[in-house]
Image: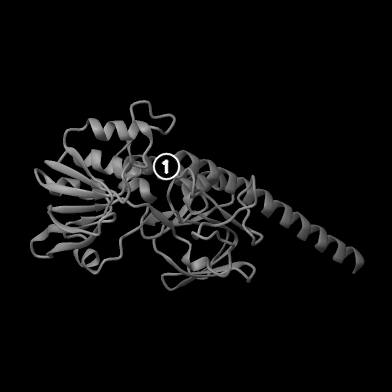
């Protein structure tokens, strides 16, 4: 695997990356998928997926990604587990450093997705995994008959809160505004759930607890009055959005002010020829599994056509040189 050159390297193994792998593998481009630190992407920390076409009864997120993976392996996709620490896009072929190996790629599809945002509190960092979580699906079962809070007010926050009511005795949603940002159907679902209550115009200023015994409560700050109150709870779940995983491309690929990769309208082309972006890494609007898969397909087709045109041009150049020689 060390110092090999691949026609296509795909960064990320969520719906975008694996759909790109499916199309490039079937086009006989023998792609390499570098899985990253979260193989399967965000869907592996999602429970029921009911809105992906083809699964009429719904499917669990991790199971769906397992189906994706088996399908792409069938066509010869290769996988490398690990995280890319550096990319050099000014070189041809592109160079990627991954777990001590240098991997070269003629074309690169970036589908590194987005990661959960955190509040940035010292106590939050200290208690991650000890009562503080950004994944209800992963950790909800640890809070049977306990009281938890969910920080956030969008669709994700409502989904997390609703899921947590399967286990927790009470779920309090803490939101900076006085109304949720979630879609109407999600808001209605939350309001109708007897286990969910709301704490408006507030933020978590501190999380109380020790690693030994877990979270014991939070300090809440009212953003209108600046008053602080202590609130007893056994767990804190963050659902305040995501940030794109684009750090290693800073200074090489064009990004918007939030760090999402910019692509040419109607395509997956980035500002660097031969580098394509798919999925949540370039999508700040929709962020759905099905849209990620759609752009994964687009990136694969764009990469395939780009490689074909490039090889055709190189062949013509060689032919012309041989003719003139």
The percent position of residue 195, horizontal first and vertical second, equals 16, 37
Residue 40 in view in this figure? no
Q: Residue at x 14, y 49 (%)?
A: 142
Of the 4 image quadrants, the one containing the C terminus is bottom right
- Element at label 1: helix
Left or right? Give the position of 187 relative to 110: left
Q: Which residue is mark 1?
A: 68
Q: How is the image coloured?
A: one colour
**Residue drawn at (19%, 46%) of the image:** 140
Q: Is residue 6 above or below residue 264?
A: below
Viewer-closest of 128 and 239? 239
- Nearer the observer, 32 or 121: 121
State which quadrant residue 54 falls in: top left
Q: Residue at x 15, y 41 (%)?
A: 167
Report the residue that reaches farthest toward the bottom. Answer: 100
262, 67: nearer the viewer: 262
- Picture coordinates of residue 132, whole percent (x, y): 21, 57
Name the one closer to the observer, 143 or 66: 143
> How many numbered tags mark residues here?
1
Q: Is any atom of residue 295 visible in this view?
A: yes
Looking at the image, residue 209 lies above or below residue 67: below
Q: Residues within 10 Å of mark 1 (few under 14, many from 20)?
A: some
The picture places residue 291, in percent across and down from the top left corner, at: 50, 41
Taking the image as shown, residue 324 lies to the left or right of residue 302, namely right
Q: Residue 258: x, y in percent?
A: 49, 59
Q: Residue furthest top?
A: 56
């Amino acid at each position: 695997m060390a110092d090999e050159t691949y026609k296509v390297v795909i960064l990320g193994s969520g719906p975008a990356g694996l759909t790109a792998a499916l199309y490039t593998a079937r086009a006989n481009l023998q792609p390499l998928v570098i899985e990253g630190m979260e193989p399967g992407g965000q869907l592996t920390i999602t429970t029921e997926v009911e809105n992906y076409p083809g699964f009429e009864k719904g499917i669990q997120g991790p199971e769906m990604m397992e189906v994706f993976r088996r399908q792409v392996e069938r066509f010869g996709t290769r996988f490398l587990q690990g995280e890319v620490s550096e990319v050099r896009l000014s070189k041809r072929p592109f160079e990627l450093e991954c777990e001590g190996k240098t991997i070269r790629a003629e074309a690169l599809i970036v589908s590194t997705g987005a990661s959960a945002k955190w509040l940035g509190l010292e106590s939050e960092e200290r208690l991650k995994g000890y009562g503080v979580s950004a994944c209800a699906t992963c950790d909800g079962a640890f809070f049977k008959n306990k009281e938890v809070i969910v920080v956030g007010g969008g669709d994700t926050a409502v989904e997390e809160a609703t899921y947590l009511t399967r286990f927790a005795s009470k779920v309090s949603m803490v939101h900076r505004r006085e109304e949720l940002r979630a879609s109407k159907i999600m808001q209605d679902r939350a309001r109708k759930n007897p286990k969910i209550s709301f704490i408006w115009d507030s933020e978590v200023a501190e999380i109380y607890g020790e690693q030994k015994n877990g979270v014991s409560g939070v300090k809440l700050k009212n953003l209108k009055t600046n008053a602080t109150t202590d609130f007893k709870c056994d767990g804190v779940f963050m659902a305040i959005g995501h940030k794109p995983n684009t750090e290693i491309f800073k200074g090489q690929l064009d990004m918007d002010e939030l760090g999402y990769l910019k692509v040419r309208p109607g395509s997956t082309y980035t500002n660097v020829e031969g580098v394509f972006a798919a999925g949540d890494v370039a999508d700040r609007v929709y962020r759905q599994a099905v849209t990620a898969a759609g752009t994964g397909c687009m990136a694969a087709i764009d990469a395939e056509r780009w490689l074909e045109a490039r090889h055709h041009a190189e062949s013509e150049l060689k032919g012309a040189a041989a003719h003139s020689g």
